[in-house]
Amino acid sequence: MAVPGFLARDRIVAKPGFNRWLIPPAALAVHLCIGQVYATSVYKAALVADFDSSLTAIGAIFSIAIVMLGLSAALFGTWVDRNGPRAAMFTAACFWSVGFLVGAAGIATNQLWLLYLGYGVLGGIGLGIGYISPVSTLIKWFPDRPGLATGMAIMGFGGGALIATPLSRSLMSLYDDGYDGTAATTASGTAVALLFVTLGLVYLVFMMFGAAIIRVPADGWQPEGFDPSTVKSKALVTTDSVSAANAIKTPQFWLLWIVLFCNVTAGIGILEQASPMVQDFFRDGETSAVTVAAAGGFVGLLSLFNMAGRFVWSSTSDVIGRKGIYMVYLGVGLVLYIALATVGSSAVWLFVLLAALIISFYGGGFATIPAYLRDLFGTFQVGAIHGRLLTAWAAAGVAGPLIVNGVLDTQGTPGELVAGDYRIALFIMVGLLAVGFVANLLVKPVADKWHEPKAQTTPTPERSAAR
Amino acid sequence: MSSPERSTTPLALIVVAWALVVIPLLYGLVQTIRTASALFTG
């Protein structure tokens, strides 16, 4: 499918002398917007009240969006690689913004299916395309520090929720005099609809700004002073290229799929239950040593570590290697989970420390995976390969909550659970991390038979389009 | 690079672009830290 000329890849090839440090803010402009998807809890209660519906029915909006993220990233990854980041960012901005506007119409007319279609399906497509749109471009601009580059962008996805949560509270307070931004009051449906319209328009402008300033490097461009042979000398790093169609036929792709699935599922185990979990761990009878306000603070702290881990650990992977950093995420994560299950209830500070480190590994796992893919498969179609791998995220988004909620349902009633009731769920996560650890250990360089002939791997639109 | 056409990215553009993403991020960080502080005070 051809794109209009102003979006075409050949229109955004950077001229010599272009400063590559303009690319991270372009990527952040997109990821900071789509990261809003992790802030949906801020208006969840308002939607339940407005639609007179259940938490499950409203929670399905988020689930649909995440599943659509995985599916659209997988389906449109090759299109994104072929047409370049401006076309992808533009398209993502349109879908994400229209998703909000259709969702607002659904809230205003009290039709939940419109909210599913708007925010869930259309918004979810925007999420998937937007998530992968700047990743391969960043890797090409920063061949010397791919972990740092992808960490910066994907940190923005974590940061998006940090911005959207307080911003949404402020806007809903503005649109509804009866809402004061605390859990004691609930915003009206009209206020949420107006919030959706506002966010949809603001995000459209912000993402279009990213699309306007994004550039791709010219063929053969290298940063000054960069010697590609120093990268090649590292284990597992290839200078060859593997197409997306071939990548999914390799064991390496599926081993990384398992690695991502296990790491994300384990992280969701804590994120899904963060607020009630910290209270349950320190429950004595009907009361908990951790107040509702403090539990809210715990959720905020996890958001900070989720975001920081994306940047810090992904950057660290440039030094210790991708396989090494995943051994930390999965191996140390496994030990931390065991500690959480066994001694986590002995002190609040210990529980918080363990959970925060686990969540930083969760974020780090997301941010490092594109650089791992680039190491194994080259930069040729890394965006499309990344898109296909994100189906692991969609699967984990379903499996993680199912495991945790399924186990807790057998242990007792919410509000009466104690630390011991979480033990089975936590040890299931330990098992998952062990599986991921072994999968990561099994990753070896991709066999030569999957490499593209050298002459065919220049990512010009014409050549890529033929693939 | 051998192309004779050479450009320089204006420093102001880089500063503005970074400011546009960093300022909202700082707002979110400050607000989240304020919320998170309840863990130790609340």
Image: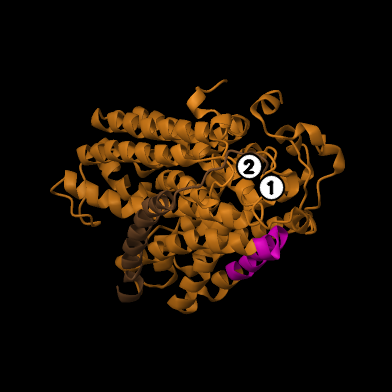
Chain colours: A orange, B brown
Q: Does the magenta segment cover residue A238?
A: no
Query: Magenta region's main secondary structure?
Result: helix
Residue contact between numbered discs 1 and 2, judged by CB atoms under 8 Å? yes
Q: Is residue A247 left or right of residue A395?
A: right
Q: Which mark is residue B11?
A: none
Q: Are marks 1 and 2 on the same chain?
A: yes
Q: Where are the magenta residues, as a range?
A: A318-337
Question: A162 or A238, which is in the foreground?
Answer: A238
* Residue A66 appears left or right of A299: right
Q: Is residue A300 left or right of residue A423?
A: left
Quadrant for the N terminus of chain A in the image: top right
Quadrant of the rendered structure where residue B37 is? bottom left
Q: Quadrant of residue A429?
A: bottom right
Which quarter of the rendered picture does the C terminus of chain A lie within? top right
Q: In the rendered structure, does residue A329 fall within the stretch colored magenta?
A: yes
> In 3D space, how far apart are the residues under numbered discs 1 and 2 (Cα atoms)?
7 Å
In the image, residue A28 above or below residue A271: above
Please name the residue shown 60% across and 30% down the image: A75
Q: Residue at x 36, y 49 (%)?
A: A41
The chain ID associated with circle 1 is: A
What amino acid type is highlighted by mark number 2?
His
Which class describes the residues within 10 Å of circle 1: few (<14), some (14-19), or many (20+)? Answer: many
As drawn, B21 above or below A211: below
**Lower sequence index among marks 1 and 2:** 1
Residue A265 at least partly seen: no
- Residue found at x 52% / y 55%: A152
Residue, disc 1? A373
Badge 1 amino acid: Leu
Indicate the position of residue A355 as horizontal and vertical percent values: 50, 67
Residue annotated with mark 2: A386
